[in-house]
Image (tube, grey):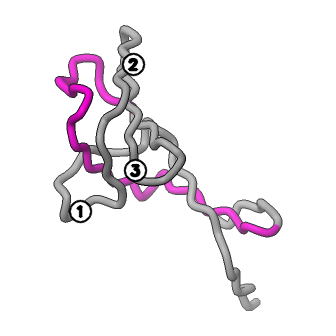
Amino acid sequence: MGRAIVREATVGVRPEDLVVCNPEDAWFGGKLAVAERLGSQTYGYLETGDARMLTVEFPRDTTISVGDLIHVRPNLDAVHVFEEASGRRLN
């Protein structure tokens, strides 16, 4: 059985599935605008250059500071791909 060709897709990754990495391996990067410390974890909100911020979950003991440049890549086992037109999950 053949596979349909999808012209546009949306990639989804949960904040806990993003991993801090060096710039050469990064899929995304941005300046840390907000660090929200919640006890068991810290959420960081990165300004990526468009209207939306990227949310990254960090361990509780992270040493990030507002203004830091953060580079992240997804855990590839946790990437979700959706068909743009229908919203149907493709993987």
What is the three-letter code of the residue carrying label 1? Answer: Asp
59 to the left or right of 77: left
Q: Which residue is mark 2?
A: 36
What is the three-letter code of the residue carrying label 2? Answer: Glu
Residue at 68% x, 62% y is: 82
- Magenta extent: 57-85
Most foreground residue, 12 or 36: 36
Q: Which residue is mark 1?
A: 25
What kind of element bears circle 1? Answer: helix
- As drawn, the residue found furthest toward the top would be 39
- Category of crowding for the residue at label 1, using alpha-carbon neighbours closer than 10 angstroms: few (below 14), some (14–19), many (at least 20): few
Label 2 – label 3 distance at C-alpha = 17 Å
What kind of element bears circle 3? Answer: loop
Give the mark nearer the N terminus: 1 vs 2. 1
9 to the left or right of 43: right
71 to the left or right of 34: left
Give the mark nearer the N terminus: 3 vs 1. 1
- As drawn, the residue found furthest toward the bottom would be 2
**Residue 64: x, y in percent?**
21, 27
Residue at 36% x, 8% y is: 39
70 to the left or right of 91: left
**Residue 43: x, y in percent?**
40, 26
Q: Are marks 3 and 1 in contact (CB under 8 Å)?
A: no
Q: Which residue is mark 3?
A: 48
The nearer-to-camera label among 1 and 2 is 2
